[in-house]
Image (cartoon, grey):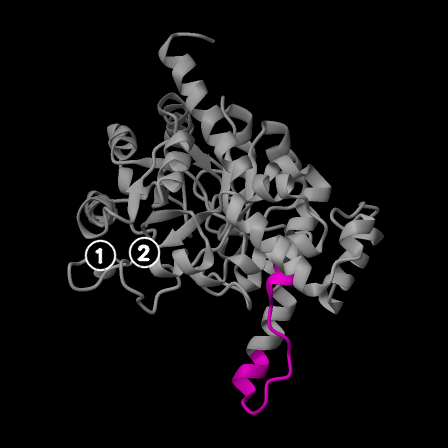
Amino acid sequence: MNATGTSAIALLASLGIAVAGCAPDTEQADESEEQLVERARGIHERVLTLDTHDDINTDNFTAERNYASDLPTQLTLPKMEAGGLDVAWLVVYTGQGPLTDEGYAAAYANAIDKFDAIHRLVNELAPDRAELALTSEDARRIVASGKKAIMIGVENAYPVGEEMSRIEEFHQRGARYMSLAHTGPSQFSDAHSGERDGNWLHDGLSEMGRQAVAEMNRLGIMVDISHPSKAAIMQTLEITQAPVVASHSAARGISDVSRNLDDEQLRAVAENGGVVQTVALRSFVNAEKAEARRQAVEAGGEVEAPDVDVADFVDQIDYMVNLIGLDHVGISSDFDGGGGVAGWDDASETFNVTLELVRRGYTEEEIGKLWSGNLLRVLDEVQAVAARMAEGAP
């Protein structure tokens, strides 16, 4: 374990938290580096690897320029193939705009453009290499066939406007998670950014936001809590009938930024049965280290400040595993939306995450849960709740 990992372990120990993955058995302890890497590669090939948050630009979904070739984006099909990333959730993201008819219309047009782009990828541009998955069974079947599985998340429900029927439309278009806000309050929810700018509109969820949670429960869409305010998140956890997902968040106990979840929120997600997809975005993983690095780069000359890396990222995983249990922790990158750390800066480097998990002593079963098992379990449970609701069961 490197010095960064050791310091994080010391932090966890000082908090009275037992550290996962730090007591390899005798056989593992006797491994050479070459044997450890070989064992990690075997695990990486066998488990289903899944990243819940990858942003897109629809300019990269044309006949002339698309993900079937190796674009300079962090995620492409060749990079997924090179790094052994099996499932990517492409994100229908819309920035927050005015809560007006004109604003809603522009947001809806943006969302449909992105939905259409994703469908174009799997249906026209690369149908032999990628396929849309709507369920966990779909994802496993597609990957077993040799293709990459593409799933869809909606980042910010702003495009719904005031037409609640659009939530069902988005579900029909393939959306399997949706957040109620991004940066700045939406018609549904306050956002984490209110901590910085004091822009609170609803004291958490609006009445429409509460209705949206119920509608997502009814349809089988996971409620994504990665961007709303703490009040909105806690209210969501009180009223949802299904587990939630934080599609790209980290622990505030390590990196104190408003987009991360504090210990109270993390424990509430675990009690709900949900999952937090640890995000590999430098400042969210380790804000102090990221800021020191940024200042050193801006100063010019030789940069001696260490970069936020895969070991720091797995420190975040360790922290949450030991706080709320392994069954409630997953993995996300936020590629092409600001994400990436040294060692996992694009999808071609995905194996390095598995390798670091193996170094920490996580078993193949545990690594499989972190990479996809926990998230797909939540998706299954959300869809089961919807099925029971459709049958009129309580």
Q: Secondary structure at mark 2?
A: loop
Determine the CA span between mark 2 and mark 1.
9 Å
Residue 261, above or below 238: below
Q: Is residue 23 visible?
A: no
Which kind of residue does numbered mark 2 sit on?
Ile
Residue that lies at the very extreme toward the bottom in this rendered image = 301
User: Quadrant of the image for the N terminus?
Assistant: bottom right
Q: Which of the 4 image quarters holds residue 389? A: top left
Depth check: give the residue in front, 384 or 338. 384
Task: Name the residue: 40% across, 28% down.
Answer: 207
What residue is disc 2 on?
56
Q: Which percent across, then down, holds residue 225? A: 49, 40
- Image x and y of residue 82, in percent: 42, 60
Q: Amino acid at mark 1?
A: Phe
Asked if labels 1 and 2 touch by Cβ distance under 8 angstroms, the answer is: yes
What are the residue bounds of the magenta stretch?
295-313
Residue located 64% across and 41% down the image = 366
* Residue 326 or residue 354, whichever sits in front: 354
Name the residue located 44 percent from the left edge and 20 percent from the top edge. Answer: 384
| Residue 95 vs residue 90, the one in the foreground | 90
Mark 2 or mark 1, which has the lower sequence index?
A: 2
Image position, residue 335 (x, y; %) = 43, 59
Image check: 187 left or right of 259?
A: left
Does the magenta portion include 302?
A: yes
Q: Is residue 364 left or right of residue 191?
A: right
Residue placed under numbered mark 1 in the picture: 61
